[in-house]
Amino acid sequence: MDTIRPSTDAPLRLGKRSRAFKRIWKNWQLYLFILPALATVVLFSYVPIYGVQIAFKNFIATKGIWGSEWVGFDHFIRFFDSYYFWDLMLNTLGISIYSLLVGFPIPILLALGLNELRNGFFKKSVQTITYAPHFISVVVMAGIILAFLSPETGIINRFMVFFGLQPIAFLSEASWFKTVYVFSDVWQNMGWGTVIYMAALAGIDPQQHEAAIMDGASRVRRIWHINLPGIAPTMIILLILSTGGILNVGFEKILLLQNQLNMDSSDVISTYVYRSGLRQAQYSFSAAVGLFNSVINLIILVAVNWIAKRKSESSLW
Amino acid sequence: MKRESTGDKLFITINAIVMFLVMVIVLYPLIYIISASISDPMYVNNGDMWLIPKGITFEGYERVFRNMDIWTGYRNTIFYTVVGTLINLVLTIPCAYALSRKDLEGRNYIMVLFIFTMFFSGGLIPHYLLIKNLGMIDTPWALLLPGAVSVWNIIITRTFFQSTIPRELEEAAEIDGCSNGKLFVRIILPLSAPIIAVMGLFYGVGHWNSYFGALIFLSDRDWFPLQLILREILIINQMSDSAMLGGAEAKAQAEQARIAEIVKYAVIIVSTLPVIAAYPFMQRFFVKGVMIGSVKG
């Protein structure tokens, strides 16, 4: 397309720069379309990135971000030296790796299974029902978890008693917290997680399957050799994205489920930032903890993307 | 179609059973909540009601509807959802269209500016201080403006425009001397109904379900969205319930606990109903949104 168009400009032999300017001028209204969204992102995303310098300062509200004095890496060192640093790190990594190990493969298996269902109505029903919990708000979800897991009245414990087991106070025992968090997430999001894989499966050339059937390949073999490689690029992209957010655990849900009794295993970096920053107003220190979190995330994302790029075709950039 | 081998038949059967079990696992809690909301809490609490409503009563719903906090929360949430989503759409759709135009000089640089924010942020504290400095605390702006643009949604919308609007349309408009503004309003917008629906739903459900912004930025109860009220009813009450109580106090609080119990399930239904009721109609739009996004993530 671009090779045809210059015919109108070429005879004028305009300089490269004035031609670029002309192209910008021609589309000036399009820049106006972008301006409000860009301004919003600059204000609410880039200004806080500029403001993160308070992590290296002793922020005093009256002096403002710029006027407060520099203290270098003091806040970071205080955080690394604190006794709870390793607790926070292990809880954060523990919850996210546990979520990844359980939550990543399940939608894939579910999508592969759904794809094999030939009864259209049954398939539609499973899809519609399993997608639904995705739209439940995190507050309601936490409310459901608390109600279902209550040791005295919760239905799960009623079932356990019915089958002769001891009731468990799931949310008062620190050791259960991660499991509760991970499996409630699986319940809520496994169906929705299949959507993107179903799209990828729909894009696989049916001729591959026809050829494999001719060769006498069983269904399991066809899933293994055709469907799985077919969705592999999607899997890699989603894996990169979720490892990039490995320290961004589901903060909002954890905050709601956290209590004094399960704190040992539920306190993660982001809930700690919330508590020390907003509840105790240690702005600079908490900003440092938050920045540490963001930087680690970015490093992991770049690293995983780099590995994916070298080992396979798929990568984010 | 070739006939299935024995192995394949076995596989199909096992697969169907597993899928059926998955469906039951997801469906059961949903049915349980509906049944519990219209059952006598006594039967709910002792486990007698486990599937079908027992001792049918609508006391829970009556109490929910008599609770002024819930009405105020409802009103506020509708306001945040409608106004917030309108702001989202006005910012997202034109921006994504402009970024979909290949003849837009410097569009890759602008995209990088947007995308970078998906992977790195200043974090909670600088964000909070910014909102504070802007004087937005305790105003609805704190819930409407900071999330006004989702970069992910811009990418999805841009992909939609790139794959549905033919280049020739824009060239023809240019030859006819039609300005970009006119082109967008007269031609592009009427063609964008599907993506506007998808984006309206993505953003709308987001507003309806969000609580954290309100938790940190609002202290005036008159502005509380429904989710914050729910947090009080479902989470904070529940916490104090399960804390250990002394014998005499326990009896005094027994009635309060019974009320909390009966309200709990009704309030879940009442707050989630708008989303769930619209869900069967919205489902294909949501799915479409995810699929457009997956074309080139």
Image: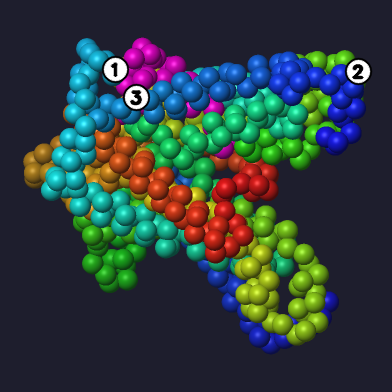
Amino acid carrying mark 3 in the image: Gly
Of B263 and A247, which appears nearest the observer?
A: A247
Secondary structure beneath label 2: loop
Secondary structure beneath label 1: helix
- Of the numbered discs 1 and 3, the one sitting upstream in the chain is 3
Chain letter for mark 3, please: A
Q: Which mark is residue B176?
A: 2
Q: Are marks 1 and 2 in contact (CB under 8 Å)?
A: no
Q: Which residue is mark 1?
A: A66
Q: Which mark is residue A26?
A: none
Residue A93: percent from left, percent from top: 32, 54
Quadrant where the image shows the N terminus of chain B: bottom right
Could you classify mark 1 by the number of other residues whose Cα lies within 10 Å: few (under 14), some (14-19), or many (20 or more)?
Answer: few
Amino acid carrying mark 1 in the image: Trp
Residue B292: percent from left, percent from top: 68, 44
Estimate the spatial distance between the alpha carbons at disc 2 and disc 3, rounded to whole Å: 48 Å
On whether residue A198 falls in the magenta region, the answer is no
Amino acid carrying mark 2 in the image: Asp
Residue B166: percent from left, percent from top: 83, 35
Estimate the spatial distance between the alpha carbons at disc 1 and disc 2, rounded to whole Å: 53 Å
Quarter of the image where one finds residue A287? top left
Q: Are marks 2 and 3 in contact (CB under 8 Å)?
A: no
Chain letter for mark 2, please: B
Residues drawn in magenta: B125-153
Q: Which mark is residue A51?
A: 3
Q: How did the renderer colour the structure?
A: rainbow
Could you classify mark 3 by the number of other residues whose Cα lies within 10 Å: few (under 14), some (14-19), or many (20 or more)?
Answer: some
Say if residue A31 shows up in the picture. Answer: yes
Chain letter for mark 1, please: A
Of A225 and B62, which appears nearest the observer?
A: A225
